[in-house]
Amino acid sequence: MGGELWAATAVLAWAGLTAWSLRPRPAPGAIAEAATLVVHASQTGSAEALAEETATALSATGLSVQRLGLSQLTPELLAKAERLFLIAATTGEGDAPDEATGFLRRLMPTPPDLSHLQVGVLALGDSSYGHYCGFGRALDSWLARAGATALFDRVEVDRLDPGALAHWRHQLTAVTGATFARETRSRPHRPWRLERRAHLNPGSPGRPVYRLRLRPIGDMPDWRAGDVAEVELPEAVAGQPGQLRDYSIATVPADRAMDLIIRETVRPDGTPGLASTWLLDRCRIGETVPLRIRPNRTFHGPDATGPLILIGNGTGLGGLVAHLSERARAAKPGPAWLVFGERTAAHDALLDQRLQGWLASGVLTRLDRAFSRDKGGARYVQDILQAEADTVRDWVERGATIMVCGSLKGMAPAVHAALRDILDEDRLLDLREAGRYRRDVY
């Protein structure tokens, strides 16, 4: 089966399983009609940031431009539009980002007539996965089947490759006259000093996990729990400029530092990962790390007074504890339940002292951990959820938001399957579309 056909088929088949919207459905008439639509399907904020940049550049030419998320797209908006610029991320093996659910449920199965529409597609992906840019390719095929006219060939970007992004901007300039500043980043990378590096799991059967503590050179910037630290690798390390790596931030500005939880990585060919080797070994304490903070609105937390179920494994704990740190500053934080998985209780109870402190203070209501390598047989986070199915249903009925952070392979689909069994598929889709089931998986 060809790549684009596979991607389109896979997206439709998985629409009810692995893709969902993280924003409530907009009220009728809430989005203004415009001749030019800039639409994003974002997982970690990159597609949304590029859409914002694109909309700004197009608006400066005098065009009537509206920027919106893919699930906010309606047949009425498409019918009135003349041009559509679509920026779509792919997560995992060809899957749609979380914020695409409404589109997948309402529009993708029955495409409207788009023969009047001119389109340009930017597909973001990671070539280390088998179905590279699968969702972007599927959307491109969907537009073609609906009769839309391509303004230029689909642009595919591997891990935010600067050259491919420059090509996208060049194409936009050619067809619209829009101009982009030479330095297009609205938040440039700033130097952060590496203050501390602590080994969190000595003796673990898994690869080493470290907590890095960084402080900015200058004022402390603002961010929210769920946002992403984008690290730029030195050219001497990466072999070329502009290589970026994303990490979940494990603290909030009130902590007066940025913590990152990073595991040593090894490539499939056995060579060490460039970023982890530099950050965990070669970068010395006191040296600086070029870093910028990228908003990741799809993983921002709900109101701090509401119940929260946090589920994750491995270094995903970093993205979860930031939410607990944020809630610790709230006047009356709601109940929070953390379900976390690692290898062994003796060596992999990551950040245990901090978690126990939150339990004692009431910031964390309940803590359940699963250790897969301990005696008694493998136990994973999905096993805890299944065993506590009645409790999960009770928390959800009381308004809980479910947030999942950690590995895309293994943990995330297993947790999804467990939640689907516990809550049923329609209920889970409703939670996703209402923004009460959010993921940051990688």
Image (cartoon, rainbow, N blue to C red):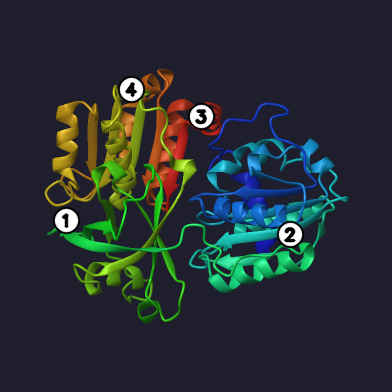
Q: Nearer the viewer, residue 32 or 160?
A: 32
Q: Residues within 10 Å of mark 1 (few under 14, many from 20)?
A: many
Q: For marks 1 and 2, give the one nearer the viewer.
A: 2
- Distance between the alpha carbons at the discs numbered 1 and 3: 35 Å
**Which comes before the other along the chain, label 1 or label 3?**
1
**Which comes before the other along the chain, label 3 or label 2?**
2
**Image spot of residue 271 (x, y percent):** 33, 77
Q: Which mark is residue 120?
A: 2
Q: Are marks 3 and 4 in contact (CB under 8 Å)?
A: no
- Distance between the alpha carbons at the discs numbered 4 and 2: 47 Å
SS category of the residue bearing label 1: loop
In the displayed structure image, the side of residue 47 where residue 220 appears, left or right:
left
Residue 137 image-quadrant placement: bottom right
- Distance between the alpha carbons at the discs numbered 3 and 4: 17 Å
The residue tagged 1 is 201
Residue type at the position of mark 1: Asn
In the displayed structure image, the side of residue 417 where residue 33 appears, left or right:
right
The residue tagged 4 is 391
- Residue 71 vs 316, above or below: the answer is above
Q: Residues within 10 Å of mark 4 (few under 14, many from 20)?
A: few
- Residue 247 vs 349, above or below: the answer is below
SS category of the residue bearing label 3: helix
**Which comes before the other along the chain, label 3 or label 4?**
4
> In this view of the protein, can residue 153 be seen by the observer?
no
Q: Residues within 10 Å of mark 3 (few under 14, many from 20)?
A: many
Residue 69 image-quadrant placement: top right
- Distance between the alpha carbons at the discs numbered 3 and 2: 32 Å
**Which comes before the other along the chain, label 1 or label 2?**
2
Image quarter of the N terminus: bottom right
The residue tagged 3 is 431
Residue type at the position of mark 4: Thr
